Amino acid sequence: MRFTVSLLGEVHARTEDGVQPENEAELLEAHLDTVMQELEKLGASDTVIDLDLGVSRVTFEVLVEAPNPLEAVSTASTQIRSAIHAAHGSTPDWPGPNHEAWSVRLVGVRSAEVLVGAF
């Protein structure tokens, strides 16, 4: 089955001293561009990253193949988190698979012809 998995979260840029930089918007946009490139390297498909700087929110969306919604979230979580880390970001408050930040939508079911032979 194919699922679109979305993660809604907060995003911030901070200096090593924990201070919000004046150019936070530019830093976040550049970082998320790098995250997108890392997702592509990981083979993530139909990836979308939406940034709302007004409320410091980011939405990640990927299409995954999985046998069920929980496995879909697990696969998407691994892809997204790995891409963030590869782009030198951090994920200290990463949500578990049952957290409300995740949403899953079934977008396709594949079937295969099963041949039953005579014995």
Image (tube, grey):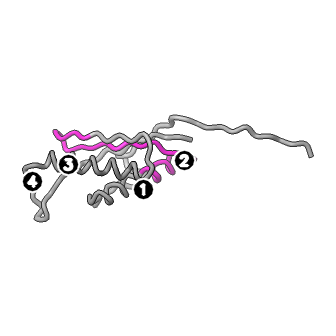
Mark 4 / mark 1, whichever is N-terminal: 4
How many angstroms separate mark 3 from mark 4 (CA)? 11 Å
| Circle 3 residues within 10 Å: few <14, some 14–19, many ≥20 | some
On the image, the x and y values in percent for residue 5 come to 43, 43
Q: Where 93 falls versus 102 (above or below)?
A: below
Residue tagged 4: 21
Q: Which mark is residue 78?
A: 1
Kind of residue sitting beneath label 2: Ala
| Circle 2 residues within 10 Å: few <14, some 14–19, many ≥20 | some
| Circle 1 residues within 10 Å: few <14, some 14–19, many ≥20 | few
Residue tagged 3: 28
How many angstroms separate mark 4 from mark 1 (CA)? 29 Å
Q: Are marks 4 and 1 in contact (CB under 8 Å)?
A: no
Q: Where 113 falls versus 17 (above or below)?
A: above
Kind of residue sitting beneath label 3: Leu
| Circle 4 residues within 10 Å: few <14, some 14–19, many ≥20 | few
Q: Which residues are magenta?
A: 51-76
Kind of residue sitting beneath label 4: Pro
Callout 4: SS: loop
Callout 3: SS: helix
Q: Is residue 92 visible?
A: yes
Q: Are marks 3 and 2 in contact (CB under 8 Å)?
A: no
Point 28% across, 51% down: residue: 34
Q: Looking at the picture, tell me which residue is in the foreground, 67 or 98.
A: 67
Q: Is residue 93 visible?
A: no
On the image, the x and y values in percent for residue 94 come to 33, 56
Mark 2 / mark 4, whichever is N-terminal: 4
Q: Are marks 2 and 1 in contact (CB under 8 Å)?
A: no
Kind of residue sitting beneath label 1: Thr
Residue tagged 2: 66
For residue 55, side relative to residue 38 (left or right) = left
Mark 2 / mark 1, whichever is N-terminal: 2
